[in-house]
Structure formats: C-alpha cells, structure tokens
C-alpha cells in the first residue's frame, strides 16, 4: 500500500458526487504542493550532489578554478530550477486553477 494522504475508496456505491469532488480537489491541490515544496527540494538535492561531486573531481585544480566551477554549477542548477518552476506554475495557473475553482463552486451548490 502507498503512504498517500488520500484515502482509498472501498465501496463504490457509497461514493457520492460530493466525495468524488473532494477527492479530486485534494489531488489537484497535491500537485500544487509538489510544485511548491518538492520541486525546490529536488533542485537543492541536485545542487548539493553536483557540488559534492565537484569537490572530489576538481581537487587537483587551483582554488579559483574550483570556486568558479562550483559557482557555475550552482548558477546552472538554480537557473534550470527557476525556469522549470516558472513553466510549471504557469501551466498550473492556466490549466488546474480554473478546474479547482469550478470544483469548489460545485461543492458550494
């Protein structure tokens, strides 16, 4: 079994429309949480892994060269992470946010 925060539905006959809408809202909001928290964490882990790898690989080089390589790698990872987050956030705002708002309106009815 997975350790998901979403509960499994055992009896499909008891699963009404309101519960379905709530479960879909939870899943859509989870995507936003992944974007906000987990993508940044993933980028930081990649940043650390590259820099730790560079510590060993660049050991024979001079200090200024090593610092330049670390700064370059850090800027590269940061730039890719920033661009990816912006693209994902724009996609979320265009595609998923309207769906979430529609589902919330359905719940209020």
Image (tube, helix red, strand yellow):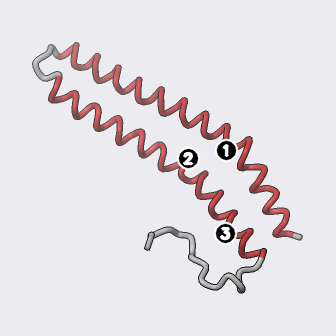
Is 71 on the left-hand or right-hand side of 7? left
- Up/down of 99 relative to 92, above or below: below
Report, in whole angstroms, how far the alpha carbon at label 3 lies from the one at label 1: 18 Å
Decide which of tag 2 and tag 1 comes sooner along the chain. Answer: 2
Residue in the image at 47% along x and 29% along y: 80
Say which element carries label 2. Answer: helix
Say which element carries label 3. Answer: helix
- Up/down of 6 relative to 89, above or below: below
Which quadrant, please, contains the N terminus? bottom left
Question: Can you tell which mark lies on residue 92?
Answer: 1
The reply to whether dot 2 and dot 1 touch (C-beta < 8 Å) is yes
Question: Residue 89's image quarter?
Answer: top right
Is 61 on the left-hand or right-hand side of 29? left
Report, in whole angstroms, how far the alpha carbon at label 2 lies from the one at label 3: 19 Å
Question: Residue 12's image quarter?
Answer: bottom right
Closer to viewer: mark 2 or mark 3: 3
Residue in the image at 17% along x and 16% along y: 63
| Residue pointed to by mark 2 | 35
| Residue pointed to by mark 3 | 23
Is 31 on the left-hand or right-hand side of 47? right
Residue in the image at 67% along x and 39% along y: 91
């Amino acid at each position: 079994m997975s350790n998901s925060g979403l509960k499994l539905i055992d009896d499909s006959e008891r699963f009404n429309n309101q519960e379905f809408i709530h479960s879909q809202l939870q899943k859509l909001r989870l995507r936003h949480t992944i974007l906000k928290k987990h993508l940044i964490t993933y980028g930081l882990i990649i940043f650390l892994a590259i820099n730790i790898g560079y510590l060993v690989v660049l050991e024979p080089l001079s200090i200024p060269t090593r610092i330049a390589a670390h700064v370059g790698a850090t800027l590269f990872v940061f730039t890719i992470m920033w661009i990816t987050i912006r693209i994902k956030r724009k996609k979320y705002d265009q595609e998923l946010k309207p769906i979430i708002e529609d589902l919330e309106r359905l719940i209020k009815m």
